[in-house]
C-alpha cells in the first residue's frame, strides 16, 4: 500500500479504519490538557461547593459535621431570599430586554454609512471598556444624595424641592442599579447584533427598495426575520450574563435598600457573615437556576 493511496483515501473510514482511529486518538491527546485545566478550575470548585453545602463549614470551626439539607433550609427560609429572587429576575429579565433594545437601535444606526461612524462606534463601546470600579464610582457620585449631579439638575429644573437619596430608597435604588447595569451591558449586545446585520446580503435591501418597500416594511420583512436566530441567542446570553452579575450591585449598594440579588446574598453569607456553608448552599441554588438557562441555550443552539 503506497503512501499516496493512503493520503487519497484517508477520509474513507470503511477502507482504512485504522487511520480514523489514529486521528481520534491524536485529537484526544490534544484535548487532555484542556480537560485537565477545566477539571481543576471549574469542576473541582463546583464539586467542593456542593460538598461544603451539606456540612457545617465555618472558618473558625474545626468540626465539619454533615448536616444534610439544613443549610438549604436556612437559606430558603431567610427573610431576604424571596426578595433576592424577585430582584434577580427583574435585574436579569428587564436588564436584558433593555440592553438588547438599546443595542438593536444603536446597531441599526451604526450599520449605516455616515461621517464619523468609526469614532461613534468607539465612543459607544466605552461603557463596556471602562473598568467596572471606575464606572461605578462615577455613577455613585452622580447618584449621591448630597452633591450628586442628578440632584443638582433636578433641583435647578424645579422637579424636586429637596435632595433625593437615590441609592437609599427602596425601589428607587434598584432602578438606579438597573440603569447602570444596562449602560454597561448594551455595547456588547450592540456589537453582536451589528455583526448579524452585516451578514445580511445588501441585495435583499436593494430589491426591496426597487419594489417600493418602505423603511418599516424592510425592517419587519427583511431585517427582523434575518436576525431572528441572532436575537434569540443574544437575549438568552444577556439574561444569563445579567443573572450572574454581581459587581455592579455590590459596589453601588452592597445589597442595601432592598437591592439584594441571589449573588450578593451568597457573597454576604460567605464573606460578611463568614458562613461558608450557607454561601455554598446559596451558590448551588444559583447554579440550578443557571443550569436551566444553559439547557435552554444549548437546546436552542442545537436547533440552529
Image: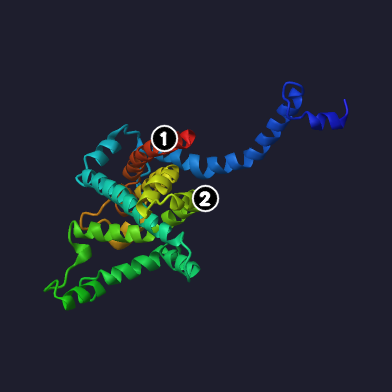
Visible in this render: residue 165? yes
Residue 67, percent from left and from top: 31, 33
Q: Which mark is residue 203?
A: 2
Which percent across, then down, holds residue 82? 22, 43
- Residue 295's tag is 1
Crowding around mark 1 (Cα neighbors within 10 Å: few <14, some 14 to 19, many 20+) is: few
Helix, strand or loop at mark 1: helix
Q: Quadrant of residue 46?
A: top left
- Distance between the alpha carbons at the discs numbered 2 and 1: 37 Å
Q: Secondary structure at mark 2?
A: helix
Q: Residues at badges 2 and 1 in contact (C-beta under 8 Å)? A: no
Of residue 41 and residue 178, the one placed in the foreground of this image is 178
**In the rendering, at what x and y percent does residue 84 appear?**
25, 47
Vertical order, 132 against 21 (above or below): below
| Residue that sits furthest to the front in the current view | 211
The structure residue drawn at horizontal position 65% and vertical position 34%, both measured from the top left corner, is: 28
Nearest the eye: 297 or 66: 297
Name the quarter where the N terminus is drawn.
top right
Q: What residue occupies the far left of the structure in this picture?
A: 161
Is 63 placed above or below 95 here?
above
For residue 83, above or below residue 110: above
Amino acid at each position: 500500500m503506497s503512501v499516496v493511496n493512503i493520503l487519497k483515501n484517508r477520509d474513507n473510514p470503511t477502507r482504512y479504519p485504522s487511520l480514523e482511529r489514529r486521528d481520534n486518538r491524536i485529537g484526544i491527546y490534544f484535548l487532555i490538557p484542556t480537560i485537565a485545566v477545566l477539571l481543576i478550575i471549574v469542576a473541582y470548585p463546583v464539586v467542593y461547593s456542593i460538598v461544603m453545602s451539606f456540612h457545617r463549614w465555618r472558618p473558625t470551626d474545626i468540626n465539619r459535621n454533615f448536616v444534610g439539607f439544613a443549610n438549604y433550609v436556612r437559606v430558603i427560609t431567610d427573610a431576604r431570599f424571596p426578595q433576592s429572587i424577585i430582584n434577580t429576575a427583574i435585574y436579569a429579565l428587564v436588564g436584558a430586554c433593555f440592553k438588547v433594545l438599546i443595542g438593536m437601535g444603536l446597531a441599526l444606526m451604526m450599520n449605516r454609512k455616515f461621517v464619523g461612524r468609526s469614532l461613534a462606534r468607539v465612543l459607544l463601546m466605552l461603557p463596556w471598556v471602562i473598568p467596572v470600579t471606575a464606572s461605578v464610582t462615577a455613577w455613585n457620585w452622580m447618584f449621591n444624595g448630597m452633591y450628586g449631579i442628578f440632584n443638582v439638575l433636578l433641583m435647578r429644573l424645579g422637579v424636586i424641592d429637596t435632595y433625593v437619596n437615590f441609592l437609599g430608597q427602596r425601589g428607587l435604588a434598584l432602578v438606579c442599579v438597573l440603569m447602570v447595569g444596562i449602560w454597561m451591558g448594551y455595547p456588547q449586545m450592540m456589537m453582536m447584533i451589528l455583526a448579524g446585520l452585516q451578514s445580511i446580503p445588501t441585495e435583499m435591501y436593494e430589491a426591496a427598495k426597487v419594489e417600493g418597500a418602505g423603511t418599516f416594511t424592510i425592517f419587519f420583512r427583511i431585517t427582523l426575520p434575518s436576525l431572528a436566530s441572532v436575537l434569540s441567542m443574544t437575549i438568552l446570553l444577556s439574561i444569563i450574563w445579567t443573572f450572574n452579575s454581581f459587581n455592579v450591585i455590590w459596589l453601588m449598594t452592597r445589597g442595601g435598600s432592598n437591592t439584594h440579588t441571589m449573588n450578593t446574598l451568597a457573597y454576604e453569607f460567605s464573606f460578611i457573615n463568614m458562613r461558608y456553608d450557607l454561601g455554598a448552599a446559596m451558590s448551588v441554588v444559583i447554579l440550578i437556576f443557571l443550569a436551566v438557562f444553559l439547557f435552554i441555550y444549548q437546546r436552542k443552539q442545537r436547533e440552529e
